[in-house]
Amino acid sequence: MRKARIVFWLVAIPILVTTIVSAISDTTRRRNERELALRNREDTRALASRLAAVPWAARADSIDGRIAGRAAQWTVHGAHGDAVTSARIYELGRGRLAFGDSLVRPLRINELLDQGDYGRAERVYYLDHTRPRNHDLALVREKSVRTRTDASASGNDTLAVEVQFDGTGDVVAARKSVNGAFVAVTPADVTALRANHDRVRGMFH
């Protein structure tokens, strides 16, 4: 009987030690995974916070520099009466940095609208995917040449417009110039930019 007990403990002790070590290892691994996940969430929030503190005009310039020389990920063309539109999407941060249900991954969309004798427009839309989908338009820049329709003042006007939106879709900064002279940005200008953005986004679906 005594010999059987000795054999039992000789077999049981290594198994017990292995079980305890394995349990400690599992606990340590789970704790490390939780700490890593917490650090990642904190790092992501910190990144989003830092990005939010940078004015979008400066962020747009940085995006332009990173995109320079790259090919677009998607290109589409469309016609609307006499107008022809081509649009290109540039995607940044293919690592897909998760932040809640969103991505810290801005996009830039370039639009070229050619209206023939009536003029042409180049628009650049900057999208912030840390925002809700219906409010992710952060900045629009437009440069356009428009033919005057008033017979008493023939010729062309050169326009430049820049409008920045916050996370709720409200305008936080705007400027506009016509032939180099600054003028007020009107609600109609903002409505037109939003409508053009929606139209172009719709071309990619």
Image: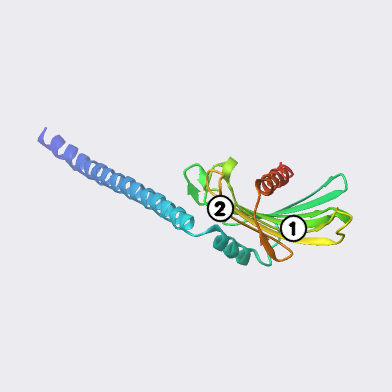
Query: Are there few (<14), some (14-19), or many (20+) residues within 10 Å of tag 1?
Result: some
Rendered residue at 84%/46% (across/down): 79
SS label for mark 1: strand
Q: Residue furthest front?
A: 152
- Quarter placement of the N terminus: top left
Left or right: where does residue 25 sit relative to residue 163?
Answer: left
Q: Amino acid at mark 2?
A: Arg
Q: In x, y percent, where is residue 66?
A: 60, 65
Q: Which mark is residue 59?
A: none
Q: Check the picture and name the quadrant holding the C terminus.
A: top right
Q: Picture quarter containing residue 163?
A: bottom right
Q: Residue at x 67, y 44 (%)?
A: 191
Name the element at disc 2: loop
Residue 62: quarter of image: bottom right
Q: Nearer the viewer, residue 5 or 121?
A: 121
Answer with mark 1 or mark 2, whichever residue precedes in sequence: 2
Give residue 57's position: percent from left, percent from top: 57, 60
Residue 130 coordinates in the image, percent (x, y): 52, 48
Up-down: is 86 above or below 20?
Answer: below
Q: Amino acid at mark 1?
A: Glu
Residue in front for this viewpoint, 188 or 60:
188
Q: Which residue is mark 2?
A: 105
Residue at label 1? 122
Left or right: residue 200 compared with residue 54: right
